[in-house]
Image (tube, grey):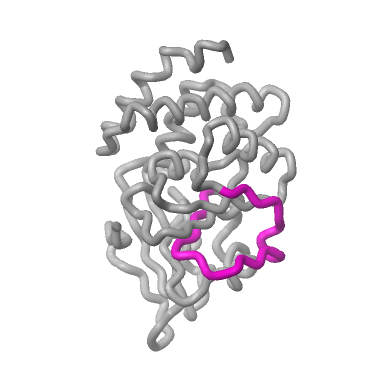
Amino acid sequence: MSAAGPPAVWRDPLARSAQALGISLKEHDSKRLLRYLALLNKWNRAYNLTAVRDPLAMIERHLIDSLALLPYLRGRRILDLGTGAGLPGIPLAICSPRRRFVLLDANNKKIRFVRQVVLELALENVQAVHQRVEAYQPPRPFDLILSRAFAPMGRMLQLADHLLGEGTTLLAMKGRFAAQELAEIPASYDVQLINTRAAVTEGSGQLLSVARSEGPLRPGIGAAGDRLETP
């Protein structure tokens, strides 16, 4: 990465893809997203943070894929479960600065990268935590838990059940695998299948929204296209 910053050739593809998603990026946010992309591209050469090598492909498959969750964010405290290289947490934190994000991962090299991003981009609303999911004990429940490519639903709920407090929603980006994983979710959870406007995680644009059931136990799949409450 040169001292001048990210290559200008990245700017228009990011703006076009965001607009196609219905998102009008502020100039400050766009610059931060591209700086994050430059850092990801640079560190990826040595640390193998992502299998995607082309920065232009990273725009669609990482930045836009993450930003597709913006309309579904709720609450002020958000946990990114198995954040990896900071996805979707970093792009969302950049574009939603009034929310606080905890980015959790057990991989030390990836958390080192995330901490460097937080430092260089001065992201005061992000905390990077190096910890296994099953061992992580937050001081209080989160409003929303995000998962992009962490684990199949059954395994994820086994590991993260203690993090699902009263009023907490788990939003898992599952793409084309969403319907297949519905059967893995115990009846003690309410679940909605959500269709988005973007190809989430290289799939069909589907999310699974999961929360503890507050009433009689029911499998409870919502109508396709149901959306989480937006702030």
Q: Which of 55 and 138 is in front in this view?
A: 138
Q: Is 87 displayed left or right of 10 in the figure?
A: right
- In which quarter of the view is residue 75 placed? bottom left
Q: Which of 217 and 30 is in front in this view?
A: 30
Q: Is 89 displayed left or right of 107 in the figure?
A: left
Residue 172 is situated, as x and y percent measured from the top left of the image, at 48, 56
- Name, please, the residue furthest toward the bottom: 216
Quadrant for the C terminus in the image: bottom left
- Count of numbered labels shown in the rendering: 0
Please report the residue visible at 57 percent of the width from the left and 38 percent of the height from the top: 118
Please report the residue visible at 41 percent of the width from the left and 77 percent of the height from the top: 219
Residue 129 is situated, as x and y percent measured from the top left of the image, at 66, 52
Per the image, is 48 magenta?
no
Per the image, is 146 magenta?
yes
Please report the residue visible at 62 percent of the width from the left and 43 percent of the height from the top: 84
Q: Is 38 displayed left or right of 21 in the figure?
A: right
- Region rendered in magenta: 127-148
Q: Is residue 210 above or below residue 45?
A: below
Quadrant for the N terminus in the image: top right
Q: Nearer the viewer, residue 212 or 99?
A: 99
Residue 181 is situated, as x and y percent measured from the top left of the image, at 50, 61
Q: Which of 47 and 76 is in front in this view?
A: 76
Residue 107 in view here:
yes
